Image (spheres, rainbow, N blue to C red):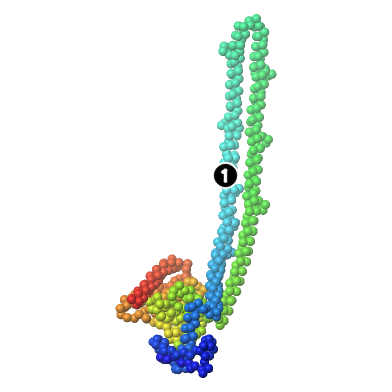
Amino acid sequence: MSVSRTTRPENYDAASNDGYGLGVPLELLVQDPEVVAELRQLDDQEREDFALRALKIGVLALKQARGQIDAETVRNEGRQLVTTLQGRLDAHSQVLKEAVDAQLRHYFDPDSGRLHERLQRLLKQDGELEQVLKKHLGEQDSELVRTLSAHLGEESPLLRHLDPEDSKGLLCLLRQTVDDQLNRQRERILVEFSLDHKDGALSRFIRELTDRHGEMAGDLAKKIDVAVGEFSLDNEESALSRLVKNVHTAQKTIQDQFSLDEEQSALSRLKRILEATQESINSQLTLDDDQSALARLRKELTEILQEQQKSSREFQQEVTTALQAMQIRKEQAARGTLHGIEFEQSLMSFIDHEFKATDDMVTATGNTTGRIKNCKVGDITLELGPESAAPGARITIEAKDKQKYQLAQAREEITMARDNRDAQVGLFVFARSNAPENLESLTRIGNDVFVVWDPEDTMTDLYLKTAITLAKALCVRARQHNESHSADFLEIDKAILEVEKQISAMDDVETWVRTIASNSEKILKKIATMRKSLLSQSEVLRERTESLKVIAEG
């Protein structure tokens, strides 16, 4: 089939034409069935224009393949990359702010924060700190009072031992010991100086003197009488009498020092020191005196708590103001004309990121016309790559963030989008803020899939990923439709039904979340079951589509 014929001008010089002058005469014979089928649908003039545009697109594609990158394309891609990055950063910033705000409220909220509650329990009247201090340092029945009473009180072992009236006390034992020692020493001395005791020192001394110096007996007898007189208790001036007096004086001094009746005694002074110490401890651990250590500690802790509450309130006000400003900006953006475009760009960025590592081709087509003249319906086109089970199959994706847009309108628009983009399967993405009421998070009607997605809520990403997987499975089923693969398609149909069932169950989970206090255990069990089922069915879809790809390649 002849596509285009260009007549050479009379003054055409092929040698001097550089490709940018009058033009290049070209006559082509098109034999490719798909291209021939497209060209035959157009009249002569439209056919020539279409062929020239197709040729230009092919030349540009070949230039890019050889590394000749169009500067305008680079700028457009750069702007799109910056927009995508800004959207991701804003979403991450929002999530981070919400998490920080939640954690700060959890600990520092003046009404319900855990730190405020703990400090209140610790510092309030009759609180934990006061109870502990009273228990260990209080004026009555505390550990300190009981310990001091046990060791220094009236019934303590120390005072009982120091009591002069106690027969087993220290003073009585000391008095008895001194008396016993004095008596023993006196008896021993008397025995040594008694002439009735032949082995005594005096008897032996007399015998020795008598034996050696008989002539001095008279003088010696006098001296002995003097010595005996020194050890006589009848003579108050004798050495023994003076010794007994000194012992009695020492005994009296000891008794005076350990007597509580004498104010200047050592025991009385010790008692006064202990009482003063106890009084000082009680004065420092009482809350009645503002200058006590415990009162000052309580005052400092109260001031710290009040300062913390003030800081918490100021921070909460700042966060609230920032959130209100963000909400106002969000509402203004929602009312503006660019909100729908932002939603479409967010969807394009998400899909482009998901299929970056695959050979599937994602194209933004919202600003270009399709098969239907002057029709731009179909925002994104996803074409399965050559390594998939249905190479070349197309999924048209329509993004809609518009109020009061119903499911019936969406069905009509996605049908038109499939025709306009020559796609086998349609995927319609509602913004959650403007989705129709009572619409499930994921719904399939024939070869069209309808999903609800919020770019700012990562929990809804599972819905969108599942919807794309479901649409790809529908492409495979639509492309390979012979009887030899009927068993595989039964498995795919079962997996699709199970995915729809689990998505419906996730809507139930969303309802339970609103009453999470009473349904937390039910939610955890249901999420575990749903996750296991979704993973299993996704694996079935992947295995079946891969097996169909292997069979098709064979």
**Residue lying furthest top:** 215
- Quarter of the rendering containing residue 175: top right
Left or right of residue 165, residue 404 in this image: left
Q: Which residue is mark 1?
A: 146
Left or right of residue 504, residue 198 in this image: right
Left or right of residue 388, residue 301 in this image: right
Q: Is residue 184 above or below residue 171?
A: above
Residue 307 x/y as whole percent? 63, 61
Q: Is residue 228 above or below residue 7?
A: above
- Quarter of the rendering containing residue 278: top right
Residue 279 x/y as whole percent? 64, 45
Q: Is residue 58 above or below residue 517?
A: below
- At label 1, the amino acid type is Arg
Residue depicted at 66% across the width and 34% down the height: 265
Q: How many marks?
A: 1
| Quadrant into which the N terminus falls | bottom left
